[in-house]
Image (spheres, rainbow, N blue to C red):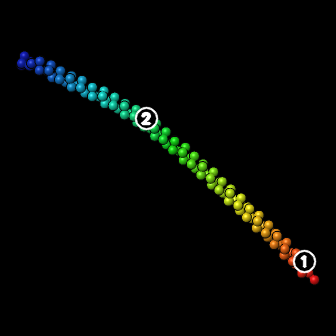
Amino acid sequence: MAADIDIRFLGELIACVQSDLRGVKADVAQLRAEQLRLEADQAQLKIELFDRIDSFQRSVDARFDNFERSVDAQFGNFERSVDVQFARTHQTMATNLDVVLKAIEGVKP
């Protein structure tokens, strides 16, 4: 029975398996290369995203700083305006008090 086995058939099967194995190895190498490319793209996107976030943060900080300076300036103007109004009111009250005191002195018997 051992004489009936055709070794050429087994050789053809081994050659087919080897060919398929070479194809699978080539596919695996291609997938690894694609994975490396995708990882590089992902790293680049992360860098771009962090740069954009950093730029946006600086922009927002600058806007808030400008807003804060504007509010401080407006509040300073308001405070000076109130001080001027207070000084005027105080001067008017002092003048009125002086007039009233002089009127009282003029009425004394």
User: Quadrant of the image for the N terminus?
Assistant: top left
* Drawn side of residue 5 relative to residue 82, left or right: left
Residue 47 x/y as whole percent: 46, 36
User: Quadrant of the image for the C terminus?
Assistant: bottom right
Residue shown at the point (63%, 51%) measured from the top left: 69
Query: Which residue position holds label 1?
Result: 105
Query: Which residue position holds label 2?
Result: 44
Query: In which quadrant of the rendered view does residue 94 lie?
Result: bottom right
Q: Is residue 20 above or below residue 101?
A: above
Bin the neighbour count of mark 2 within 10 Å (Cα to Cα): few under 14, some 14-19, many 20 and up.
few
* Drawn side of residue 19 relative to residue 65, left or right: left
Which element carries disc 2, helix, strand or loop?
A: helix
Residue 87 x/y as whole percent: 77, 64
Bin the neighbour count of mark 1 within 10 Å (Cα to Cα): few under 14, some 14-19, many 20 and up.
few
Amino acid at the residue labelled 1: Glu
Question: Quick one: 51 or 106, which is closer to the camera?
Answer: 106
Residue 50 x/y as whole percent: 48, 40
Which element carries disc 1, helix, strand or loop?
A: helix
Looking at the image, tell me whether mark 2 or mark 1 is earlier in sequence order: 2
Residue shown at the point (76%, 67%) measured from the top left: 89
Residue shown at the point (20%, 23%) measured from the top left: 19
Residue 90 x/y as whole percent: 78, 67
Q: How many marks?
A: 2
* Drawn side of residue 58 relative to residue 18, left or right: right
- In three-dimensional space, the C-alpha distance between marks 2 and 1, rounded to whole angstroms, equals 90 Å
Question: Quick one: 1 or 88, which is closer to the camera?
Answer: 88
* Residue 81 tag number: none
Residue shown at the point (87%, 78%) measured from the top left: 104
Q: Is residue 57 above or below residue 15?
A: below
Q: Which residue lies most toward the bottom here? A: 109
